[in-house]
Amino acid sequence: MPSTHAIYRTLNALPLGRSAFSLLYGLKAPYFRSIHLSVVDMRPHHGEVVVPLRRSTKNHIGTVHAIAACNGLEAAMGLLAEATCPPGHRWLPKGMDVKYLAKSDSDVVCTAQTDEAAWAAGPDVPVTVRATRADGTATVEGTIHLWVTPTR
């Protein structure tokens, strides 16, 4: 079976392929469908999605709910982890530390970043995550902690 990253690369080369991949990603992890995310980028050490400002992602004050943003951050981290995890290894999230910094009054771009050194120092791999609104203001920042171990 092809890897998630291979499927992304194949579909991304096609017209509407990124939209198709976003739909498939939501089917594979159904809780991501609730935030109606769009996958922007997936590559080793980087994952990026957009969580739209729409009724189903809004809180009581009309902004993207903080937990919807966190769901987007976890989705971005999952893309990064799938593209970065070495062959013969698996990854599991073991925690998330975030700070809510500003209101998310637009669509939110959720990014996840790592580097080679973080993966080499495993099995505890910190992933830096950040959500920004359309004007570039960070609304949520933090770290998602992964546990990366050999498969048995």
Image: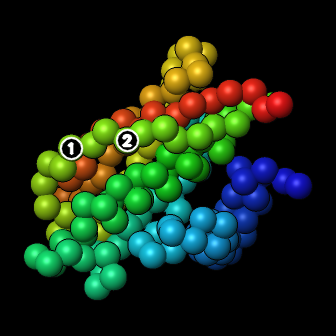
Q: Position of residue 72 (x, y in %)?
A: 41, 59
Give the labeled residue for mark 1: 99
**Can see residue 120?**
yes
Which residue is at a point 25% across and 61% down the rendered structure image? 66
Task: Give the answer, above or below, for where 47 lies relative to 56.
Answer: above
Between 150 and 64, the residue placed more toward the observer is 150
Q: Position of residue 42 (x, y in %)?
A: 59, 50
Q: Residue at x 24, y 69 (%)?
A: 64
At mark 1, the secondary structure is strand
**Rendered location of residue 81, percent (x, y):** 60, 41
Residue extending furthest toward the right: 1
Q: Name which residue type carries label 1.
A: Lys
The residue closer to the viewer here, 92 or 37, is: 92
Identify whether 11 is placed above or below 79: below
**Alpha-carbon span between mark 1 and mark 2:** 10 Å
Tell me where residue 97 sits by quadrant.
top left
Depth check, front residue: 132 or 33: 33
110 relative to 45 in the view: left or right: left
* Amino acid type at mark 2: Met
Q: Secondary structure at mark 2?
A: strand
- Report which residue position mark 2 lands on: 96
Percent across and percent down for residue 100 are 18, 50
Picture layout, residue 96 above or below residue 133: above
